[in-house]
Image (tube, grey):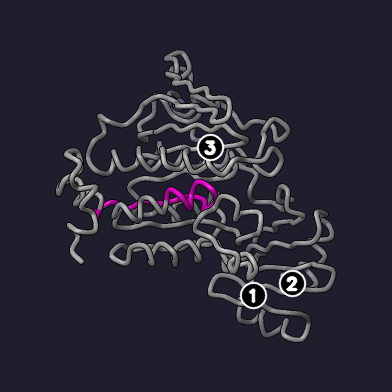
Amino acid sequence: MTETSRYDRQMRLPMIGQAGQDRLRAGRVAVLGCGALGTVAADILARAGVGYLRVIDRDVVEWSNLQRQSLFLEADAAAGRAKAEVACQRLEGANSTIRVEPVVADVTVDTIAAILDGIDLVIDAADNFAIRFLLNDYSLRHRIPWVHGGCVGTSGQVMFFDGRGKPCFRCLVPSMPPPSAIATCDTAGVLGSATHAIASLQATEAIKWLAGHPEAVRRRVWSIDFWGNRNREIEIPAALWESCPACAKGELSFLDGAADGGDAEAKVLCGRRAVQLPPPTVAAPLEVLAKRWADLGVVDASRFFVRLRLEDEVSITVFRDGRAVVEGTDEIAKAKSLHSRYVGG
Ligand SMILES: [Zn+2]
């Protein structure tokens, strides 16, 4: 198998050719979030020959993911495997000539620099606004382009940001919307074909940019209602970017810690009957926890986490970055008490 035969149909496109394929091979892309958008965008980019993909997700595969997250199988949900790990295995199976790297971690103000180190372009496949604001600040400071995508219900939108501002994401959304104002897939549902379409549009903009065609990149917000058959292209008005706190005034408050991304504290995970707890000051190594738990319940261990399954469908999963997810409760106090009893710290 030669590179020409693998990428023949793509290299026949005059705007790609050998030069574009070489540029794609040199590309280093982070896929931030490995859900409905991230699995599809990563699959397209891997098959297109983007030379390095870093897939970042803090979560494990659940049954409710299978309706749209096409890199995952039933066995992954049954085993509760880490999404980033499973995704990278499947991507390697699709294209063994590229490099893929799974990162099972929470993206926070403290971790974003390490997570995006050495990256040329980011696919925003995150499921929350806190990460997007942080990514926008990081992109402006380090001049890293990113492709925003979002999809809820039967509608979605895509926008490319080149990391130089005017516009940036905060021109569009100046401040964090209150939680009550945000519809999420967990509460409003989502159509699997809509998320595939949005992820495909994100991957398309990424391929244009990486293949050396910035002039072809769509510079407007593209918003599509796939069920209602409506689509809009919106140019961000100059009045908005002239007054933008981030790209016009240089206030990168999410990156510099003045604005709270809201991710460092214990929180109930939307729609899941689960609570996420931040890493304790001193975290016990996963191998130590696995040994300590051996007699207490069923223990699942992988390279990325260790999980203790207790009675009454309660489980505690501790990830290598120290984060824990307590499932089977939506009470923060109960989760903290279980955590201190079984994990300590
Ligand atoms: Zn801006």
Instruction: Look at the image and say whether residue 66 sits in the magenta stretch.
Output: no
Residue 157 position (above or below residue 299): above
As shown in the figure, which amino acid type bears the numbered disc 3? Answer: Gly
State how far apart marks 3 and 2 are (Cα): 38 Å
Circle 2 packing at 10 Å, graded few (<14), some (14-19), many (20+), is some
Mark positioned earlier in the residue sequence (1 or 3): 3
Please say whether residue 258 is visible from this viewpoint: yes
Question: As drawn, which residue projects farthest toward the top?
Answer: 239
Does dot 3 land on a helix, a strand or a loop?
Answer: strand
Residue picked out by circle 2: 344
Cβ atoms at labels 1 and 2 below 8 Å apart: yes
Q: Quadrant of residue 342?
A: bottom right
Quadrant for the C terminus in the image: bottom right
Does dot 1 land on a helix, a strand or a loop?
Answer: loop
Residue picked out by circle 1: 284
As shown in the figure, which amino acid type bears the numbered disc 2? Answer: Gly
**Some atom of ligand 1 lies within 8 Å of the CB belonging to the residue at label 3:** no
Quadrant for the N terminus in the image: bottom left
Please say whether residue 133 is visible from this viewpoint: no
Residue picked out by circle 3: 150
- The region drawn magenta spans 25-41
